[in-house]
Amino acid sequence: MVLAAGRGERMRPITDRIPKPLVPVAGKPLIVYHLEALARAGVRDVVINLAYRGAQIREALHDGARYGVRISYSDEGPDPIETGGGIFKALPLLGAEPFIVVNGDIWTDFDIATLPPLDASAHARLVMVPNPPHVARGDFALDGDYIVESDRDDRFTYSGIGVFSPDFFHDCQPGKFPLRPLLSRAIAARKLKGLVYRGIWLDIGTPQRLADLEASLRSPGRL
């Protein structure tokens, strides 16, 4: 699943006319890089959630055939229902097995094919990255390969890439809700694992970060 429903408020004025997943990076929409990465990893069926300017995303991507995937759309209506609500709504399209989730507003060279599969010991596995300059303390720490809540200094930032079991969303109800409380619930149950990726990862959340990425891509070796 590629998350693409957000309004992209921090990317204004760019996102006043185009949804953030379609913002071009080196001449290609940001979301297309994710579709191509998923195809390279052997993923063929992709769900994309839609809300803000969702019709533009449908029109741009169609059924995904040109990118080597088959796209299904989970339409949330005009207002996004946050990450937790959006994934939960899409579960009927995602099926009964664990599935990959990718935030649509990141840039990374992470190889999705290297994600370890889930087993009964965890309901989800998150890819964590070293804290970028705009994140002061990170999100979570690691205890072995389990994610823990901690005030330690060695915390990492959730990259927006993960593998989730449908069991992660048990007892959820339709509607708008964030992902964070569900992560805390899984941590408390010792059901959330993680791995650290130290390669290229950028959160393309503001026009300045987009400009920085474009500059880096024009200057080989800067990334």
Image: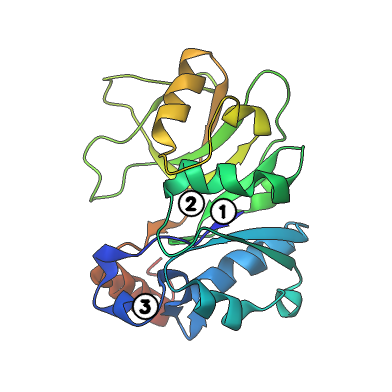
Numbered circle sitting on residue 172: none
Q: Mark 1 and 2 residues: CB-CB less than 8 Å, in contact? A: yes
Q: Mark 3 and 2 residues: CB-CB less than 8 Å, in contact? A: no
Identify the residue at horizontal 76%, vertical 72% (top origin). 68
Which residue in the structure is indicated by mark 1? 110
The answer for how far apart the CA atoms under marks 3 and 1 are is: 18 Å
Which residue in the structure is indicated by mark 3? 214
Q: Among all residues in the image, which is located at the extreme top?
A: 189
Identify the residue at horizontal 62%, vertical 26% (top origin). 123
Callout 2 environment at 10 Å: few (<14), some (14 to 19), or many (20+)? few
For label 1, the SS is loop
Callout 3 environment at 10 Å: few (<14), some (14 to 19), or many (20+)? some
Identify residue type, mark 3: Glu
Chain-order first, disc 3 or disc 1: 1
Q: Quadrant of residue 218?
A: bottom left
**Quadrant of the drawing holding the C terminus:** bottom left
Which residue in the structure is indicated by mark 2? 199
Establish if 187 lies above or below 51: above
For label 3, the SS is helix
Towards the viewer: 76 or 126? 76
Chain-order first, disc 1 or disc 2: 1
Residue 147 visible in the picture: no
Q: Quadrant of residue 152?
A: top left
Q: Among all residues in the image, which is located at the extreme bottom?
A: 27
| Horizontal arrangement in the rendering, residue 116 relative to residue 14 (left or right) | right
Identify the residue at horizontal 48%, vertical 41% (top origin). 84
